[in-house]
Image (spheres, grey):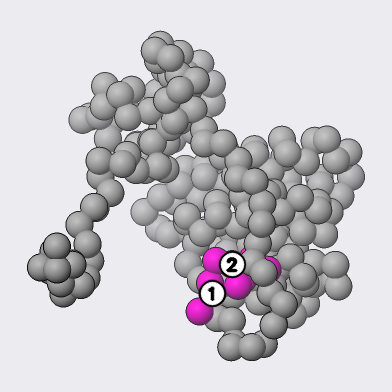
Amino acid sequence: MISTLATFPPFLHKDIIEYLSTSFLPMAILGSSRREGVPAHVNLSASSMLMIAMQYTSNPVYHCQLLECLMKYKQEVWKDLLYVIAYGPSQVKPPAVQMLFHYWPNLKPPGAISEYRGLQYTAWNPIHCQHIECHNAINKPAVKMCIDPSLSVALGDKPPPLYLCEECSQRIAGDHSEWLIDVLLPQAEISAICQKKVRANHLCGGA
């Protein structure tokens, strides 16, 4: 699938990366062996997928989208970037180095790249709810991904994965909760408590 970037025209690259990141890879990893970890073929192919994406597309949005998709399901993706830097062609080394230091800044040696300015790109929009009966789906980002084929067809009239907003996912939770996977946590589930209690108490006392 990723090799089609080498032959298909550039205007299709967005659709290829989108399909890989939102459908193909999640289903390949979670649909076949959800409880067994990342399949071996995905582990072995991750560095190749990143290298091909950087070689045949120049838009860093696509590079980051594919990388972040792999980071959701695979451990130590930074090693895959190191493989790309070590063994990839010359044109893929700069974007691979940029992404390595952008997502893992602790790996950057002090003063190693004096002119490094970080990675600048325009992020893609979140996936919206795909429930056919969702109210105002265009303004409701998906927070859950359903990988059950029967539910995807019944609720979204499409093959899995089916992306659902918080309201729609709560409707089918319960008996089907094992098929729902977090993709975007609601703000209410994110901790707003200061992790450094000493600093927080100091500020409160000063006030």
For the N terminus, give its image quadrant.
top right
Q: Which residue lies under the disc numbered 1?
A: 105
Q: Are marks 2 and 1 in contact (CB under 8 Å)?
A: yes
Is residue 134 positioned above or below 33 on the image? above
Q: Residue at x 47, y 43 (%)?
A: 31
Q: Residue at x 31, y 41 (%)?
A: 187
Numbered label tally: 2
Magenta-tinted stretch: 98-106
Q: Is residue 149 visible?
A: no
Q: Amino acid at mark 2?
A: His
Q: Nearer the viewer, residue 125 or 150?
A: 125
Q: Position of residue 85 (x, y in %)?
A: 73, 75
Q: Residue at x 45, y 19 (%)?
A: 137
Q: Residues within 10 Å of mark 1 (few under 14, many from 20)?
A: few
Quadrant in the rendering for residue 10? top right
Q: Nearer the viewer, residue 82 or 191?
A: 191
User: Is residue 1 shown left or right of residue 28?
Assistant: right
Q: Which residue lies under the disc numbered 2?
A: 102
User: Is residue 56 shown left or right of residue 73?
Assistant: right
Q: Nearer the viewer, residue 94 or 198?
A: 198
Quadrant in the rendering for residue 101? bottom right
Q: CA distance from mark 2 to mark 1?
A: 6 Å
Q: Position of residue 93 (x, y in %)?
A: 77, 72
User: Is residue 76 shown left or right of residue 171?
Assistant: right
Q: Residues within 10 Å of mark 2 (few under 14, many from 20)?
A: some
Question: Mostly what secondary structure, the magenta segment?
Answer: helix
Q: Which mark is residue 7?
A: none
Q: Position of residue 44 (x, y in %)?
A: 63, 66
Q: Amino acid at mark 1?
A: Pro
Q: Is residue 157 visible?
A: yes
User: Is residue 88 shown left or right of residue 180?
Assistant: right
Look at the image and say whether residue 124 sits in the magenta stretch: no
